[in-house]
Amino acid sequence: MSGDLHISTAVIVVAAGSGTRLGASLPKAFVDLAGQTLLERSLRSIILLPYPVQVVVVAPADFVADAEVIAYKVAPGLEELVSVVTGGATRHDSVAAGLAAVQSSVHVVLVHDAARALTPTTLFADVDMAVQATGSGIVPALPVVDSLKQVDVTGGVLGIADRDQLRAAQTPQGFPRAELEAAYAAAGSSDYTDDAAVFAANGGAVTTIPGDEVAFKITTAWDLNRAHQVLGGIPDAHRVGTGIDVHAFGEAENLWLAGLHWPGEKELSGHSDGDAVAHAICDALLSAAGLGDIGSRFGTADPAYANASGEVFVHGTIELLAAAGFEPINVSVQLIGNKPRFSPSREEAQAVLTEWVGAPVSVSATTTDGLGFTGRGEGVAAIATALVRQR
């Protein structure tokens, strides 16, 4: 499906937006939506058209290679019909860059925002056919349902706008190729809000057709959540992990447990300070994030951790979580042992551990009624459960 085909329609997919309002750390088109980027979802709708079209993706300079990987994944073997070009400083410049890459055989150009990732294939086909039938610019649009007011700069109401004469424009917007190129060549400003405005400013006629409710633009985190709901719900980004640590008592009276020093109590034996509560917290957090355990991350063979405090391990664990894109939500710890008597220091311990973790930590304590090594006073055990969230 390449050189021997007469391609009469091209779709320019604008994917150069920054995603600032979405709060994303990468351009909006490359944000994940239920396992696929917004760009990938947009391209899949286009590729499902029952006839071949040229597709030109306009991407930020630093993401051209990423866009190519996505495009060729969606359309394997269609390299002659799918290309990626570098976008400009404004949307106006990006569309112009996409137009420059359109094949000479193309008569109809559709311009689509990758941020409208759920736009159905049928809407692309409807816009394309309407352009071919009318020779006009075509904009899919929805009726405005809210009551509209005209206001002054202070917010004072000046009058009522007739919503029957208003429509909310969507994409893809379609145009005769020659007229759209002429409009962009003649445009002396890049302040137009969409391609239909550029087209109309050069004398082109623009007509609307019915849009589609699911073709909404994903601009904010609220919009992204809405898109997840349309697709069947927001995937749970929360993870739960469990950690267990056990230490025997030694001889020296230098106990560190739950982040506190316990004068007069025998220390817990171990390579470090033996703080079973802190170590169980680390294991629970690492387990929740799928990052292994404290032994694999802070091995006893490393002299840097000899006699290290529980604070060192907890802070190190939080850094590992952050690097992997996780943050702690809360941790619960059950301490098992006959000594020390924990309840008088519970709140102090919880405050210290909460500060270390950067999220609420609760600690409870129990005994085993004289059973087992904890019942015999030979040591303590701690079981922690952690909840983390993937950012």
Image: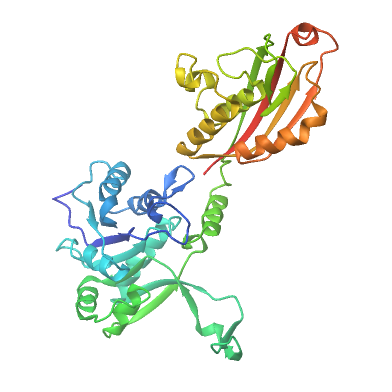
- Quick one: 296 or 151, which is closer to the camera? 296
User: Would you place residue 93 above or below residue 361 in this image?
Assistant: below
- Quick one: 251 or 95, which is closer to the camera? 251
- Tell me where residue 191 sits by quadrant: bottom left
Apparent side of residue 159 relative to residue 258 in the rendered image (left or right): left
User: Would you place residue 176 above or below residue 49 in this image?
Assistant: below
Give residue 317's position: percent from left, percent from top: 53, 31
- Quick one: 353 or 66, which is closer to the camera? 353
| Residue at (33, 67) in percent of width and height | 129
Give residue 244's position: percent from left, percent from top: 65, 19
| Residue at (59, 75) in percent of width and height | 145
**Is residue 53 among what the camera can see?**
no
Give residue 286's position: percent from left, percent from top: 55, 28
User: Would you place residue 338 above or below residue 25 in this image?
Assistant: above
Give residue 154's position: percent from left, percent from top: 58, 87
**Is residue 260 among what the camera can see?**
yes
- Tell me where residue 206 sits by quadrant: bottom left
- Tell me where residue 121 sits by quadrant: bottom left
| Residue at (41, 62) in percent of width and height | 123
